Image (spheres, grey):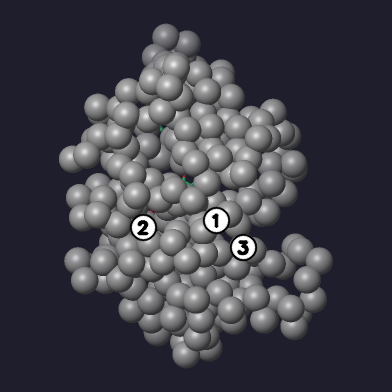
């Protein structure tokens, strides 16, 4: 199981380093369960803590208190090097801006996450080629990012996110920089990775149409959690 569980999460940020009185409580006793194989759209106004939740689930940040449990493992107790290893095995990240390295080809960008694995060069090439065909970019493998369209760059970024075969994909505004048609193509691709390849997807988005691709929409503004039933009360927009 790769269920994602957030239990009694408190997340408080310090606004500035030299101050104790200006704390921002972003989440207070927040609970969430996302089952393996779900495609969840996290929505709601800016500042509600959506990106913060992605960072907690992906082990990029830790809660002030509470538990982050992924696939039965409590990851908020891992140290930094354990977390780095855990992330590499379990999580793929997709961001609004693709963060591809301009000096590397699509193929080389996708191979990057495999650099620190035990895989040899030819295995890395093979895995990257497989990931690129999965996102329909096999014929662009030798292209550099600047030779690709925005949608194609995002496809390569998705290939890089899935090249290690993580079970969970975390996407932060993956269509934020794209026109409607291209956004729909990227959303269809994410839906395919969810349905056909079993990826659990948690996607932060402001795109109302993205909700149509997700299997569940959680709007943080109206979200409540039934602790007894252990169930998210879904909020359709
Ligand atoms: P959303 O993704 O819903 O827009 P965020 O999770 O980005 O919300 O941010 C929630 C709140 O936490 C905002 O008020 C933001 O300013 C604050 N915040 C986020 N990250 C930090 C940080 N690293 N340091 C201080 N405050 C932060
Ligand atoms: P976007 O433009 O899509 O919002 P950002 O560069 O703002 O992308 O990244 C969103 C968050 O994810 C930031 O808090 C950043 O620290 C973090 N982040 C970005 N790239 C990576 C990465 N490769 N690995 C881990 N965290 C990352």
Of labels 1 and 2, earlier in sequence is 1
Residue annotated with mark 3: 165
Task: Name the secondary structure under disc 3.
Answer: loop
Image location (x, y in percent) of residue 204: 36, 46
Mark 1 Cα-neighbour bin, 10 Å: few <14, some 14–19, many ≥20: many
Image location (x, y in percent) of residue 180: 19, 66
Residues under labels 3 and 2: Cα distance?
Answer: 19 Å
> Which residue is rendered at x = 45% and y = 29% of the image?
32
Task: Name the secondary structure under disc 2.
Answer: loop
Q: Cβ of disc 1 within 8 Å of ligand 2?
A: no
Residues under labels 1 and 2: Cα distance?
Answer: 13 Å
Residue annotated with mark 1: 92
Res. 110 in view: yes
Q: Which of the two discs, 1 and 3, sits closer to the camera? A: 3
Quadrant assignment, res 177: bottom left
Q: Which of the two discs, 3 and 2, sits closer to the camera? A: 3
Image location (x, y in percent) of residue 208: 20, 50
- Say whether residue 72 is left or right of residue 155: right
Of labels 3 and 2, earlier in sequence is 3
> Which residue is rendered at x = 52% and y = 23% of the image?
7
Indicate the quadrant containing the C terminus: top left, top right, bottom left or bottom right.
Answer: top left
Res. 15 in view: no
């Amino acid at each position: 199981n790769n269920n994602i569980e957030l239990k009694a999460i408190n997340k408080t940020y310090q606004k500035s380093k030299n101050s104790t009185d200006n704390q921002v409580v972003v989440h207070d006793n927040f609970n969430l369960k996302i089952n393996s194989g779900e495609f969840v759209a996290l929505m709601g106004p800016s500042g509600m803590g959506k990106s913060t939740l992605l960072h907690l689930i992906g082990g990029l940040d830790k809660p002030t208190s509470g538990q982050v449990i992924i696939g039965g493992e409590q990851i908020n107790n891992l140290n930094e090097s354990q977390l780095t290893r855990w992330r590499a095995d379990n999580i793929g990240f997709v961001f609004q801006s693709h963060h591809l390295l301009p000096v590397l080809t699509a193929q080389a960008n996708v191979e990057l996450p495999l650099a620190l694995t035990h895989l040899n060069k030819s295995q890395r090439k093979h895995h990257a080629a497989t990931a690129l065909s999965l996102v329909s970019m096999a014929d662009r493998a030798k292209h550099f990012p600047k030779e690709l369209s925005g949608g194609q760059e995002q496809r390569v970024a998705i290939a890089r996110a899935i090249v290690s075969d993580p079970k969970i994909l975390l996407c932060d505004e993956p269509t934020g920089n794209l026109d409607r048609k291209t956004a729909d193509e990227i959303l269809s691709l994410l839906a395919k990775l969810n349905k056909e390849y079993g990826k659990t997807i948690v996607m932060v988005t402001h795109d109302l149409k993205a909700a149509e691709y997700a299997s569940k929409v959680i709007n943080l503004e109206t979200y409540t959690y039934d602790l007894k039933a252990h169930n998210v009360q879904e909020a359709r927009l």
